[in-house]
Image (cartoon, rainbow, N blue to C red):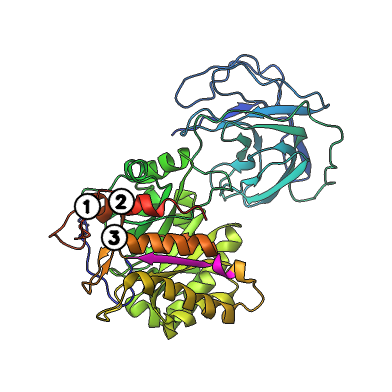
Amino acid sequence: MPSALQHAPTHRRPAGRTKVLSLTAAAVLAAGGLATLAGNAGAADADLLANGGFESGSLTPWSCSAGTGGIVSSGAHSGTYALKGAASASDTAQCGQTVSVQPNTTYSLSAWVQGQYVYLGATGSGVTDPAAWTPGGTNWQQLSASFTTGPSTTSVTVYLHGWYGQGAYLADDVTLTGPGGGSPSTPPTGTPSGTPTGTPTGGPSTPPPNVALPVAPYIDMGAWPTPSMPDMAKAGGVRGYSMGFVTGVGCKASWFNAYDPRTGWAKDQIDALRAAGGDVKLSFGGAAGTELAAACTSVDSLFNEYDAVVNAYDLRYVDYDIEGAAIADTASDDRRSAALAKLQQAHPGLKVSLTLPVLPEGLTRDGVAVVKSARDAGVNLDLVNIMAMDYYRSGTDYGNAAVQAAQSTFGQLKALYPAKTDAQLWAMVGVTPMIGENDDHQIYDQAAAQRLVTFAQQNHLGLLAFWDATRDANACTGGSLAKCTNIPQQPYEFAKIFSRYAG
């Protein structure tokens, strides 16, 4: 990563099951129309956990159970059934029904639910999962999703998820609508029997929507041996990392020209972080390799690569580390911006950050242009993360320079986003120094890190990070800057300082 103007090369490596309970279909859709899907009350002995830890007894309609208790009782409200979430990080409690559908046809799903982290979706050959979710609450909420069948699709499984050990209620039935329409369902009346409850003992691969990462050090996933993010997080006290870097082999996303992100490489580490209450930011670009926006010649092809990676890792955060020749390539900048706007439309709530070179006086002219391009394309930027490092100015206090660079960037964002409040603008600022010895041999030490944490606490910055976690863990001197900070420190000392920041 990151450096303001230059970066020393890093060493690069050579190039759960979830079981679905299918209940008897209540309707078969022929040419279209509207059908409601209701389960059979007599469905029995459904093995719901991929790890084989629990087998339930008789199930009520559209009901799942997980964990060590019995089945979840039906709610008191007529037509309301209970759904309970998964018991471990690799499982989701999922129940569904299989129905016949027509190929090459668009259908919509609708259901009234109450509870936390309830998901509604459909799966089948040639179907992209259109899952919709609700973050919870005490009121009834209508979930809606749509999907298009493929040329050979003859059936789909409509499902409900209960995740993170949380309870939920389903009112009435799930409505599946095809060509020909149908009347929309009306909100249920009455109150469910109590509030859905549950004690999480793990979690699925996608965390609840309120997971925040005020601290996310960069980690070079191309280092050898491959770093273990869960082990390092536990040792350093941080909740997550900015994983670097996905680049392009031609117009094809790749982990440092070695692994295809579509295979979910290192996802087991991400799942472990999420199960512990954390998450990751996945970073595209960096100092080495070809940035995808330069490799892909159309917005659609670029979007497809970004979208594939987001889907492979169930991402909530994506970061774009733009430096070197890439930052001055206005054509690729505009292509990236258009693709990111499309990506956010496809993934509502996806948080996008731009990581850019900076000087104490602020973003470079090219950096400002990148932010402006994203703004004008309609990208909802979560963060502008500055690489507060490698200024190549002798005698510079790197602790003071990082704070000054943040203040200068705040002023630039104020000009770019005049409608935002100061608090909103500070929340858009992220700061990433290079810990220890920088490439220009200037030093960013522990006192500088503490100074930045104090400044962030005073202004509520959106992100603190550093380059990089492996160097912090090694705590070595006299070695390569790709591996060592080359200053006296204890292992994970910088992580422990930065982890004091809570946003």
Which label is found at residue 475?
1
Which type of secondary structure does the marked residue at label 3 adopt? Answer: loop
Which label is found at residue 493?
2
Which type of secondary structure does the marked residue at label 1 adopt? Answer: loop
Using the image, determine if residue 33 lies above or below residue 479.
above
Q: Which x, y percent locates residue 302?
A: 45, 68
Which numbered mark, 2 or 3, is in the foreground of this view? 2
- In magenta, the rendered stretch is 425-433
Quarter of the N terminus within the rendering: bottom left
Image marks 1 and 2: residues in contact by CB distance under 8 Å? yes
Q: Nearer the viewer, residue 67 or 218?
A: 218
Q: Nearer the viewer, residue 97 or 16?
A: 16
Q: Residue at x 41, y 39 (%)?
A: 272
Using the numbered discs, state the Cα–Cα distance from disc 2 to disc 3 in whole angstroms.
28 Å
| Residue 430 on the magenta span | yes
Relative placement, left or right, of 315 versus 154 is left
Q: Nearer the viewer, residue 26 or 11?
A: 11
Relative placement, left or right, of 121 versus 476 is right
Which numbered mark, 3 or 1, is in the foreground of this view? 1
Q: Residues within 10 Å of mark 1 (few under 14, many from 20)?
A: many
Farthest residue in the bottom direction? 365
Which label is found at residue 256?
3
Q: Of the residues under marks 2 and 3, which one precedes in the sequence?
A: 3
Using the numbered discs, state the Cα–Cα distance from disc 1 to disc 2 in whole angstroms.
8 Å
